[in-house]
Image (tube, helix red, strand yellow):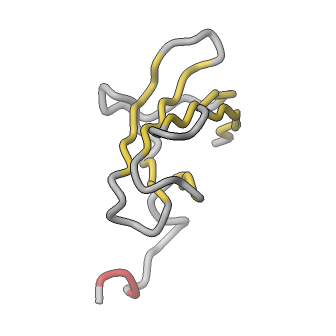
Amino acid sequence: DRERSAVSGRGEPRLEFRGLPSQATIRIFTVVGELVQTLNHDGSTDGYVTWNLRTKDNLDVAPGLYVFRVEAAGYSSKMGKFAIIK
């Protein structure tokens, strides 16, 4: 199967948001508040969504510090931050 095939190098860059409610929206921002990407979790996976490190304009995201906000009905929104180092 495709997931078990050998991958040269480090593989596709990605970041996973885990422990999500069944329906959630994740918005990723630069530290100055510009929207980078919006991800939607529709419950089709087991509480996680994967981000391919591409912007909403389908460009590679730049190294740096980012802020994310997770929103889901019935839950208070949660915020966090992460750094991308290339």
Question: Which residue appears at 50% of the width and 13% of the height?
Answer: 34
Relative depth, front residue between 52 and 19: 19
Q: Is 53 displayed left or right of 83 in the figure?
A: left
Counting from the top left corner in percent of width and height, residue 60 is at 43, 35
Question: Which residue appears at 57% of the width and 31% of the height?
Answer: 69
- For the N terminus, the quadrant is bottom left
Quarter-of-image position of residue 79: top right
Q: Is 78 displayed left or right of 47 in the figure?
A: right
Relative depth, front residue between 4 and 68: 68
Question: Which residue appears at 37% of the width and 81% of the height?
Answer: 3
Counting from the top left corner in percent of width and height, residue 28 is at 52, 29
Quarter-of-image position of residue 66: top right
Q: Height in image: 63 above or below 39? A: above
Q: Height in image: 46 above or below 55? A: below
Count of residue discs: 0
Q: Height in image: 4 above or below 48? A: below
Relative depth, front residue between 35 and 53: 35
Relative depth, front residue between 26 and 13: 26
Q: Height in image: 59 above or below 49? A: above
Counting from the top left corner in percent of width and height, residue 38 is at 39, 32
